Amino acid sequence: MVELLPSILSADFAHLADEVAAAERGGGTAIHVDMMDGHFVPNITIGPPVVKCLRKVTSLPLDCHLMIENPNEFIPAFAEAGANWVSVHYEACPHLHRSLQLIAHHGMKPGVVLNPATRVELILDILPMVHHVLIMSVNPGFGGQEFIPFSLDKIRRLAELRQELGLAFRIEVDGGVAHDTVARVVQAGADLLVAGNAVFGAGCTEQDARSLLAAARKAANE
Ligand code: DX5
Ligand code: ZN
């Protein structure tokens, strides 16, 4: 089943609770939260204190995307704050197996993220450990960037591997998911759609979430 994960990076941070509630009314089924440290990516956002506040205003799973160096050091704090899904970048984790184990041992769902230039085949051996694989369809760091078309080939390859290996991990896509790209993303095999600008960018959060999800589900049934 295709799901929409609104990314609060493009929301109004002064009214986060209202923004999350509107995204949920529009059909969002998990909230995507972007953590950036100014080192792994060229931007700084938020961390566990904001996750803790979000935990109080929504019962949806909090999908925490860690774009940070040394993510292992922060995993206990995210668990404590109430994170549900935590994904770490292949490129930031020299001991990826350990990082994924650590997330699972803290009772959260582990995910691995691949930057656009990172090949899907590199994570073959750890696929049985993950709840989701996140394919970045932009270079991480900012909302509102243009979708990178070859991401579709990576989604297709991952969907093939999932079938070949008999696994059930979810395929998540993040970056440039909007009305002009969503059908191709879904038809390539993605089932968790992160969208920031397309949901929060125009100030009509509920309607924009609803229409994007409707377009995704229509494409899934075609
Ligand atoms: C980018 C973040 C995304 C971002 C996507 O580094 O990981 O989650 O919010 O934004 P859009 O949907 O606007 O491309
Ligand atoms: Zn993200």
Image (cartoon, helix red, strand yellow):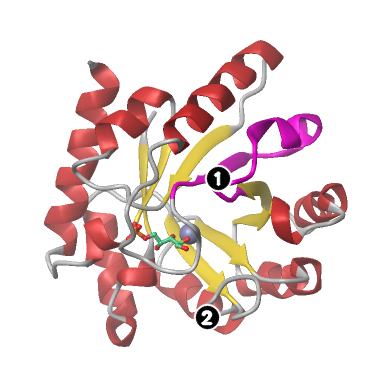
Quadrant of picture, ligand 1: bottom left
In the rendered structure, find residue 37 and report the number of the disc placed on it. none
The residue type indicated by label 2 comes to Ile
Examine the image and state in which quarter residue 93 appears. bottom right
Number of labels in the image equals: 2
The reply, left or right, for residue 77 in relation to residue 201 is right
Helix, strand or loop for disc 2: loop
Q: Which part of the image, by quadrant, shows the N terminus?
A: top left
Image coordinates of residue 47 in percent, x first then y, are 58, 79
* Residue at 75% in and 56% down: 103
- Which residue corresponds to mark 2? 46
Image coordinates of residue 27 in percent, x first then y, are 26, 48
* Residue at 65% in and 78% down: 39
Ligand 2 closer than 8 Å to label 1 CB: yes
Asked whether 159 or 84 is in front, the reply is 159
Magenta stretch encompasses residue 209: no
Instruction: State the extent of the magenta-drawn residues as a range.
Output: 114-137
